[in-house]
Image (tube, rainbow, N blue to C red):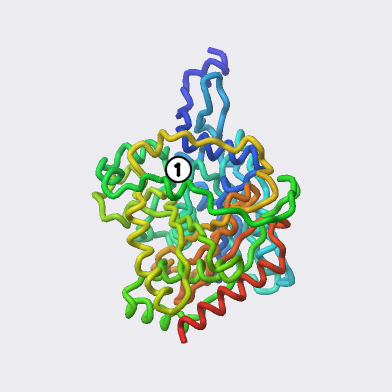
């Protein structure tokens, strides 16, 4: 039998992309990546090297079939084809002398689109050339195979496998697998999740206005990031204060975000906050081990004017309940998800932002690695949000990352916003 026939008989697995995956692939193509690319950067201390990372990634590919996927266009639509060999995954390393801000590497990776016909994820290890035990692990995933929570978990799992390889024992860690089809996940969830307290979407669909900005072509836009770390002692004070006000940390950060935006853009302007949520927050029955135990969807909350401290805490308290009430209706996976016809979207940014707050990134038991911080960003070339803000508690501190599209947003405006955000946060703690 000819070699070609052998390959045909092997029957390489294929799965047709659902509406959500088709949407994210369309965004990726139209905006050279854009919001279809997620990027996690972890600062790590310990005996990490690129060969160890490669061995770990090889094991992860065995554990998660979607890491072997590429996207192929056929006459009846787009398909995942699970035939990507390990040597096609971009896993690289570089040494630097500590003079280059790690954000430069993150910005470069998040602004580089995938060749989706070849692979849907990539890894870069940056090691300090002077302090060889100081590293930055940067992992990018295509939004069609993962979501923010799973991408963060994937990085932690990568490190857990490194611990296994060094110690010769299996690590006991609770991990989220990389996502299968959004439609497959939704089909495995009780219908009540999507029908009880579902939002009609009318309020979220209403435009909240736009911020004027230069009309810059997509190929000249790049994602830029700023970051600020809340120190452990200040974070403890903020958590105690939030609990005393019967608010969650996510609600508190949402109130800070809205207040900072209103001070920058005008107090009477409603700011729309998009928040990816996990279904596990809704206390619904657990999904089976073979499926992802987390489904992230964007809940959209329109803010009211925050004029004083009581209004601040009132918004923070109401925020979580409003998110849970915004769970998508049962037909969410089948909704028409259309990529904008005009990639440039006109000279303006929507008065909305994304906010993600993750649970504590716990230390891997008996690990020689210390995870010092986590940064999560997504591509902003599509300019579908004013800003993407993420907060990832780790080692008692809280790194907060601000991502935005440059030069659509003026650098001076972003600097003022970040300073205002930090000022409100500090004033809240006092």
Give the image location of residue 27, x and y in percent: 59, 40
Give the image location of residue 394, x and y in percent: 46, 71
Q: Residue at x 57, y 26 (%)?
A: 73
Q: Nearer the viewer, residue 123 or 15?
A: 15
Q: Residue at x 70, y 53 (%)?
A: 222
Q: How many badges with numbers are in the image?
A: 1
Residue most extreme to the top? 1
Q: Is residue 60 visible?
A: no
Give the image location of residue 293, x and y in percent: 34, 49
Q: Nearer the viewer, residue 353 or 357?
A: 353
Q: Is residue 369 visible?
A: yes
In the displayed structure image, the side of residue 323 where residue 217 appears, left or right: right
Q: Residue at x 55, y 70 (%)?
A: 260
Q: The residue tagged with tag 1: helix, strand or loop?
A: helix
For residue 267, above or below residue 142: below
Q: Residue at x 38, y 64 (%)?
A: 319
Residue most extreme to the front? 268
In the displayed structure image, the side of residue 249 where residue 53 appears, left or right: right
- Crowd band around label 1 with a 10 angstrom C-alpha radius: few (<14), some (14–19), many (20+): few
Give the image location of residue 44, x and y in percent: 55, 68
For residue 24, above or below residue 41: above
Kindly identify which residue carries mark 1.
62
Q: Nearer the viewer, residue 143 or 364?
A: 143
Residue most extreme to the bottom? 430
């Amino acid at each position: 039998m000819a070699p070609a026939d052998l390959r045909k008989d092997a029957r390489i697995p294929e799965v047709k992309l659902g509406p959500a995956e088709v949407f994210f692939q369309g965004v990726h193509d139209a905006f050279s990546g854009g919001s279809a690319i997620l990027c996690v950067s972890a600062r790590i201390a310990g005996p990490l090297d690129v060969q160890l990372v490669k061995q770990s990634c090889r094991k992860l590919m065995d554990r998660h079939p979607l890491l072997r996927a590429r996207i192929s266009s056929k006459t009846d639509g787009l398909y995942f084809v699970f035939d990507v060999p390990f040597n096609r995954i971009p896993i690289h390393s570089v040494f630097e002398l500590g003079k280059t801000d790690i954000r430069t590497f993150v910005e470069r990776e998040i602004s580089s689109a995938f060749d989706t016909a070849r692979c849907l994820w990539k890894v870069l290890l940056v090691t300090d050339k002077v302090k060889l035990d100081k590293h930055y692990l940067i992992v990018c995933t295509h939004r069609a195979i993962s979501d923010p929570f799973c991408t963060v978990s994937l990085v932690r799992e990568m490190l857990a496998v490194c611990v296994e390889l060094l110690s010769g024992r299996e690590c006991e860690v609770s991990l989220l697998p990389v996502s299968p089809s959004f439609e497959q996940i939704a089909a495995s969830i009780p219908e009540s999740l999507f029908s009880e307290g579902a939002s009609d979407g009318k309020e979220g669909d209403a435009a909240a206005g736009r911020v004027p900005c230069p009309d810059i072509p997509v190929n000249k836009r790049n994602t830029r990031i700023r970051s600020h770390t809340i120190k452990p002692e200040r974070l403890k004070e903020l958590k105690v204060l939030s609990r005393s006000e019967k608010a969650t940390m996510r609600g508190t950060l949402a109130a800070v975000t809205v207040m900072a935006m209103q001070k920058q853009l005008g107090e009477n302007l409603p700011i729309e906050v998009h928040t990816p949520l996990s279904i596990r927050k809704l206390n619904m029955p657990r999904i089976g081990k073979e499926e992802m135990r987390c489904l992230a969807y964007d809940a959209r909350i329109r803010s009211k004017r925050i004029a004083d401290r009581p209004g601040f805490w009132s918004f923070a308290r109401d925020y979580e309940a409003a998110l849970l009430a915004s769970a998508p209706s049962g037909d969410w996976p089948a909704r028409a998800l259309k990529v904008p016809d005009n990639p440039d979207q006109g000279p303006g940014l929507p008065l909305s932002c994304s906010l993600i707050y993750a649970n504590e990134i716990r230390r891997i038991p008996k690990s020689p690695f210390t995870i010092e911080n986590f940064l999560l960003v997504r591509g902003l070339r599509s300019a579908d949000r004013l800003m993407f803000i993420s907060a990832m508690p780790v080692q008692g501190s809280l790194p907060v990352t601000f991502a935005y599209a440059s030069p659509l947003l003026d650098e001076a405006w972003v600097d003022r916003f970040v300073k205002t955000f930090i000022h409100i946060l500090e004033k809240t703690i006092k």
